[in-house]
Amino acid sequence: MMDVLRIVPFAVIYYPGLTSTDRYYDEIKHPMDFGTMSSKLNLGDYQYMEQFQKDFELVLSNCRTFNPPTTYPTLCADTMEKQFKKEWVRAMEKKIPWVEKRSLQSLMAQLNKENM
């Protein structure tokens, strides 16, 4: 999953050809990004796995709302969603220890680090 996520942080939020993010905040009423998700993980703001999932899906939804179909950002969002769905099933299994579920935290930290 890390290989997939490495290509996305700079592209998912808005199309790179734009010179201003003003339009983004006019169109997207509930912004969410991987840096915010990483902070929320570090602060323990996610009490349930579903809250993390909802924020992740919001990032992808915002991307698809703001960017035209078939552009690089939306294609990245599609790829990330497919991979996330595969990994999410494993994370939600009760047999997986909490430590492995917390690997999501390290994943988000990596996304945040690469985004900078």
Image (spheres, helix red, strand yellow):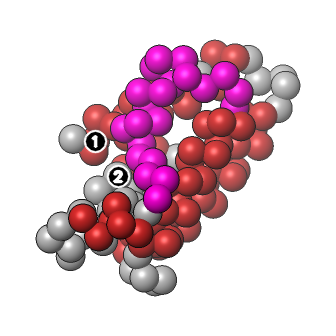
**Residue 100 visible, this angle:** no
- Assess whether residue 47 is covered by the magenta stretch: yes
Query: Which mark identifies residue 9?
Result: 2
Does 43 sit left or right of 95 as displayed?
left
Nearest to N terminus: mark 1 or mark 2 = 2
Marks counted in the figure total 2
In this orientation, which residue lies closer to the viewer: 10 or 25?
25
Query: Type of residue at label 1?
Result: Glu
Residue, x 27% and y 45% (percent of image)? 115
Label 2 environment density (alpha carbons within 10 Å; few <14, some 14–19, many ≥20):
many
Query: Type of residue at label 2?
Result: Pro
Q: Position of residue 13 (x, y in %)?
A: 36, 59
Whether 111 is drawn above or below 24: the answer is: above
Does 22 sit left or right of 2 as displayed?
left
Q: Which residues are magenta?
A: 29-49
Q: Which residue is mark 1?
A: 114
- Assess whether residue 110 is covered by the magenta stretch: no
Label 1 environment density (alpha carbons within 10 Å; few <14, some 14–19, many ≥20):
some
Q: Position of residue 110 (x, y in %)?
A: 37, 34
Residue, x 45% and y 19% (percent of image)? 42
Query: The residue tagged with tag 1: helix, strand or loop?
Result: helix
Q: CA distance from mark 1 to mark 2?
A: 7 Å
Q: Are marks 1 and 2 in contact (CB under 8 Å)?
A: yes
Whether 6 is drawn above or below 27: the answer is: above
